[in-house]
Image (cartoon, rainbow, N blue to C red):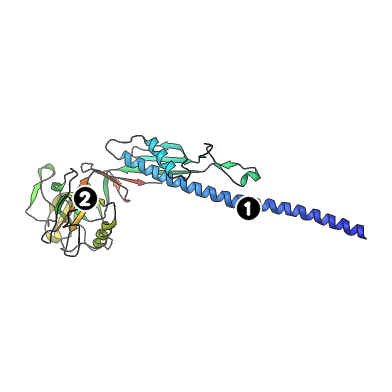
Amino acid sequence: MRRVMDRLCHEANGGISVMVALLLVILLGTAAIAVDAGAMYAERAELQNGADAAALAIAQECAKPVGCVDAAGIAALYANENAKDGASNVADLTFPTANAVRVQLSSRDADSGAGSLALSFAPILGIDDTTVGARAGARWGVPLSGPATLPIAISPCEFTEDGQWHLLRMKEPGSTSACAGPAGQNVPGGFGWIGNGNDSTCTEFVTAGNTIASDPGGNVAGGCEQVLEDLKTNPNKIMLLPVYDQVTGTGSGATYRIRAWAAFEVGGWHLSPSVKYNNTTGTTTGGLTCTPSCTGIIGRFLTYTTLEDGFQAGGSSEYGASFASLTE
């Protein structure tokens, strides 16, 4: 009887050993999936950030008057800067159209230089490494239409791209103050509010070549007080604003014909007794002031590429504005 029991115990121990071995394989497989899948997910997120940044940076470069310069170098720089280990591969860099770029990134091991991601647990299952990739596309152009975040139209008389701060005074449609505009037309100077002034978001969608109604009210339009309030703390105070070349009618019946877009860095303003900023100190506005008897905006015109969404290409580049945006 004792021999029988010993034999049964020995067989049971053998069965337990097999079961433990099987469970270990399952546990290691689960660990491989959890740890290595997490590493692959993190790697892909880094590569996607790098691809997005590289595509946008190339689009910004290509939007400049000099065109695309060292696109491959820009792609490598932004790809590596967005990788925690500072290493990634630019697997492919193409220009599908004259105004678009596509960047494909893949893994690169910072230590070995291998074009793959080393895995931690999967080698137990015979899988030593894997390749992870990400792709992004971007486009650029000169805006034809898009959102005027601050719905004002600027006179071409005011445009001077000299890097200096200028005071743009508000002019109501019908003002006698005028200058020689495009094709010798006389157009009012300064700027005017556009749109119906009732949009709580402040933004007006504008298309060059079309006309848009003026907002002759004396108060700051719609939700623009919040837009201006946000500008105070935004380190980037550059926005694209429409430039008009013709004004017809007066008061609530007036319209502006939009010619193109200009890039304008806002430095200060005095639009009402309560809506004002940096209008007296002159600390960042070249000594310019806009006191209570003045209604105006202080700023300067720049050559600039915005990353704001919503712009469509096809406009005139005469005022130095362009855009770049992701497409995929």
- Pick the residue in front: 12 or 258: 12
* For residue 189, above or below residue 220: above
Of marks 2 and 1, the one in the foreground = 1
Choose the circle earlier in sequence order: 2 or 1. 1
Pointer 1: what residue?
30
Residue type pointed to by label 1: Thr
Q: Quadrant of residue 249?
A: bottom left
- Mark 2, other Cα within 10 Å: few <14 / some 14–19 / many ≥20: many
The local secondary structure at tag 2 comes to strand
The local secondary structure at tag 1 comes to helix
- Pick the residue in front: 251 or 221: 221
* For residue 199, above or below residue 34: below
Q: Which quadrant holds the N terminus?
A: bottom right
- Mark 1, other Cα within 10 Å: few <14 / some 14–19 / many ≥20: some
Residue 155 percent location from the top left of the image = 15, 49
| Disc 2 to disc 1, C-alpha distance | 58 Å
- Extreme residue in the left direction: 176
Q: Is residue 132 left or right of residue 67?
A: right
Residue 27 percent location from the top left of the image = 66, 53
Residue 49 percent location from the top left of the image = 43, 47
Q: Please give the label number shown on residue 242.
A: 2
Residue 8 percent location from the top left of the image = 86, 57
